[in-house]
Image (cartoon, helix red, strand yellow):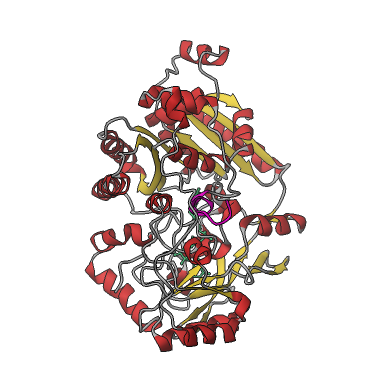
Amino acid sequence: MKTTYRSIFKWGDKREEKLEKGVVELVKEQFQYTDADFDKRVLYGDREIVLDQKPKIPAAIRQQFEDISGSENVRWDDYSRASHAFGKFYGDLLYLRKGEIATPPDLVVFPRSENEVEQILALCQQKNIAITPTGALSSVTRGAETPRGGISLDLTKHLNKILKVNRVNSTVRVEPGVYGPALEKYLNEHGYTCGHFPQSFEYSTVGGWVAARGAGQASTGYGKIEELVLALRVVTPAGIIETKDFPATAEAWDLNKIFIGSEGTLGVITGITLKIRKYRPENTAFASFVFKDFASATLAMRQIMQAGTGFPHLFRLSDPVETATAFKIKGFDGSFSDRFLKIKGYRPGARCLMFVSVEGDKDYIHLLKKKIKRMARKQGGFYSGSHPVKEWLKQRYESAYLRDPLMDIGIMTDTVETSVTWDNLLNLWTNVRRYLESREKTHVMAHISHVYENGANLYFTFLSPMKPDEEVEDYLQYHRGLIDSIHANGGSLSHHHGNGRALAPWMEKEMGKTAMGLLQATKDYLDPKGIMNPGNTLGLR
Ligand SMILES: Cc1cc2nc3c(=O)[nH]c(=O)nc-3n(C[C@H](O)[C@H](O)[C@H](O)COP(=O)(O)OP(=O)(O)OC[C@H]3O[C@@H](n4cnc5c(N)ncnc54)[C@H](O)[C@@H]3O)c2cc1C
C-alpha cells in the first residue's frame, strides 16, 4: 500500500472503509445499483507510482538546497514528489486514481527553521524556481499544486511546534505545521481550547487553516480563523513581515488580513498567535429541533442570531433532502418517533433537522438554550432533545471517509460551499439545487453550518454516477456550471475552503478589475518574480 497512487489519495488514516448498510441502500435506490455493482473497483489506483518526468532542477542546485536543510530533508524520489503534487480536490483524486501526475514538484524540501525558509526563498528567487508551501495537503480547491514544478515546501515535519501559551492574554503561539489534534490536546491539557474544528481537523494544519481562511464546525460561536488570528509572521521574497498581538489597532490596514487567505501566494507563514478559550466540556448545552420546512427553520436561525442574546457554538441545519438522507441512513425511518413526527405534520421531504450546542458559563448556557428553544418553537421547531447532537459529534469527522469507497464503485461525490446574505439565502439554495439536480441521477443535499447575524453559509453535497472514461472532463464541466450558478445567484465563491486554482478563473468577475489590480500590486511588491505558488488563488500572473 505504501507507494501506490491509492496510498496518496485515500483520506486521513488511509483505512479501507466499507459503506454502511444505509448508504448501500441509498445508492441502490438512487442510482439503481445492484449487489454486483458494489464489487466494482473503479480507477482503483493500486499501481506502484512511477513518474515519467524526472526532476528538472539540476543536481548542482539541488545540492544548494541540501546545504541549507540537510540531505535528509530534500527528497526527489517518485513517492515524495507524487505525494506533494495534489491536495484533495475531487479532480485531483481522479487524476491520482488514473495515475496521471502532469506537474509534480521537482523537489520536496522540509525546512528545519524559519531561517532555512528565508534561505530557501532567497535561492528560489535567485534561480527563478517556483515554490509552494504545504501543510497537510487537504486543500479542496487545488491550492497546493505545483504547475511549474519547483519546490514543495513541507512545513509539517519540523515547523510544527507549539511555542507558548500566554494565560494572561489567553493566546497561543504556534509554528504553521502543527496538526489540529496535537494543538487541541496540548491546549486541553492546559485548560484551553482553540475552538477551530474543520471536518478535516485530524489531517490539516494551523498554517493551512490560516492560509486557506477556513472555518471550524463551531465557528458560529468561536469565529472563523480570521477572527482567531491575532498575529502572524510571514517570510516573503521581499523580506519578513511580522504583525503584533495587539487586541485591536488603528494602524492603517489590517496586515493580518492580507495574509489570511493568501494561500501561499505572498509568502510562507512561519508564526501564528491565536486566541484561545477556556476548555470546559462539561459546560456545554445541546439541543436539536425538527422543523416543518427549510424556510421556517432558516427564519428561526436568523432570529436566534439577531436576538442579541448570544450565539450558539455549533449551529447546523440540514435541508429536507439531507435530513431525509440522514434519517434513512441512521435507520430512523419507520420508527415510533418517525411516525409521531409525521402525525404532527413534520413530513419527509419537507422537514429539516437543526443541531445546536452552546458553550461557556453554566448560567449563560442554560439561559441561552432556553431562549433558543423558545425562538425555535415560535417557528414550529419540535424539540428533539440533546441526544442526536451528541451522537453526531461522536462521528463528526467520519463522513470524510465515505468519499473513497463511493468513488471505488463509480460514484462522483463532492462538496461546494458559499456564503450568502439572509435576504438571498432561499433564492440561492433553490436555484443552485435546481442546477445540481439538472444532471440526471444526482442526489443533492445541502446544509447550513456557519451562521452570522447577516447571513449564513450554504454547503452543497452531491452524488452522481461517474461517466466512464470521461470522469475528469464530465466532473470539471459540472463543477464549472455549479460555480457559475453560485456566482450568478449572488453567493461568494467560497466560504471556508479557500479559492485555489479551482476558483481562480472567477475572481476577476467576482471582485472587479480595480480590486484585482490592488491584489496584483501587493503580490508584485512581495513576490516580484512570481515564484510563490504561481497561478494559485487569484489567477494572478
Ligand atoms: C474531508 C475534508 C474536509 C474538509 N473540511 C473543512 C472544513 O470543515 N473547514 C475548512 O475550513 N476546510 C475544510 N477542508 C479544506 C482543508 O482541509 C482546509 O483548507 C485546511 O485549512 C487546509 O489545511 P492544510 O494543512 O491541509 O493545508 P494545505 O492543503 O497543505 O494548503 C492549503 C493552502 O494553504 C497554503 N499554505 C499551507 N501552509 C502554509 C503556510 N504555512 N504559509 C503559507 N501558505 C500555506 C498552501 O500553499 C495551499 O495553497 C476540508 C478538506 C477535506 C479533504
Q: Position of residue 312 (x, y in %)?
A: 56, 43
Indicate yes or no whether the magenta region holds residue 9. Answer: yes
Q: Residue at x 48, y 42 (%)?
A: 404
Residue 539 in view here: yes
Q: Is residue 291 visible?
A: no
Q: Nearer the viewer, residue 443 or 27?
A: 27
Residue 515 picture quarter: bottom left
Residue for point 53% across, 25% down: 21
* 33 to 135, vertically: above or below: above
Q: Nearer the viewer, residue 368 or 11?
A: 11
Instruction: Tell me, yes or no, whether the highlighted magenta stretch contains residue 504.
Output: no
The answer to which image quadrant residue 392 occupies is top right
Viewer-closest of 439 and 239: 439
User: In the rendered image of this protein, does residue 299 appear above or below residue 506?
Assistant: above
Image coords of residue 62 (percent x, y): 50, 83
Quadrant of the snapshot with the C terminus: bottom left
Judge whether 250 appears above or below 88 on screen: below
Residue 110 locus on image (x, y percent): 58, 73
Task: Find the magenta span and give its range.
Answer: 1-10
Q: How many marks?
A: 0
Find residue 18 and report its horizontal and vertical position in percent.
55, 34
Task: Name which residue lies at 45% across and 18% down.
Answer: 346
